[in-house]
Image: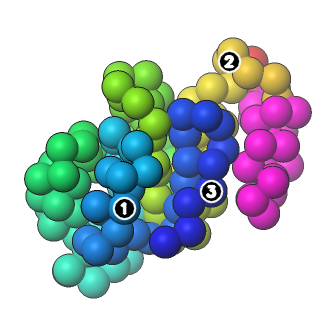
Amino acid sequence: MDIRQITDNYAVSPQIGLEDVATLREAGFTTVIDNRPDEEIPASLHADKMRSAVEAAGMVFVDNPITPGNLTMNAVEAQRQAIDASQGPVLAYCASGNRSSIIWALAYAAEMDTDDLIALPARHGYDLNHLRPTLEKMR
């Protein structure tokens, strides 16, 4: 598992496995957001299986799948609500962590500086420069 801390309360990761759930709990995460559609992954990692494991470990699970090239504002708002409702740090995952970084940046575009929204994920190799016009427009 490769946790990449974006902010104090939000981290992203490539796909996690059921065996990673206990480690996430021990690391202090209270909410896990799945940004990966079931169609991309084996049945053993589908949202229903992950939900069962995450909730059994005492954390909140949010299924907010994002299909590449089809990110909606409803998904952005759902991500924001899940992050804001969390009682502690959030881990969001997808195939690489990129989609989870993009949706975070869009969710906070109205209140964070655009340069920060781009720079924070960039520390982990996520290049969000292509979002600059959108982020500035949303500001």
Residue at image location 30% in from the left, 62% down from the top: 21
Q: Decide whether the magenta segment is chiefly helix, strand or loop.
A: helix
The answer to whether residue 130 is above or below residue 15 is above
Q: Residues within 10 Å of mark 3 (few under 14, many from 20)?
A: some
Whether label 2 touches label 3, CB < 8 Å = no
**Horizontal placement of 31 versus 100: left or right?**
left
1 or 2: mark nearer the eye: 1
Residue 103 lies in the magenta-colored region: no
Q: Which of disc 3 and disc 1 is earlier in sequence?
A: 3
Quadrant housing residue 39 = bottom left
The magenta stretch is 115-136
Q: How crowded is mark 2: few (under 14 residues within 10 Å), some or many (20 or more)?
A: some
The CA span between labels 2 and 3 is 23 Å
Q: Residues within 10 Å of mark 1 (few under 14, many from 20)?
A: few
Residue tagged by mark 2?
Answer: 110
Residue tagged by mark 3?
Answer: 4
Amino acid identity at mark 1: Thr
Residue at image location 36% in from the left, 28% down from the top: 86
Amino acid identity at mark 2: Ala
Q: Which of disc 2 and disc 1 is earlier in sequence?
A: 1
Residue at image location 34% in from the left, 39% down from the top: 30
Disc 2 is placed on an element classified as loop
Residue at image location 40% in from the left, 43% down from the top: 28
Amino acid identity at mark 3: Arg
Question: Which x, y percent locates residue 9?
Answer: 54, 34
Question: Which x, y percent locates residue 63?
Answer: 29, 49
Residue tagged by mark 1?
Answer: 23
Residue 134 lies in the magenta-colored region: yes
Q: Can residue 64 be seen in this view?
A: no
The CA span between labels 1 and 3 is 14 Å
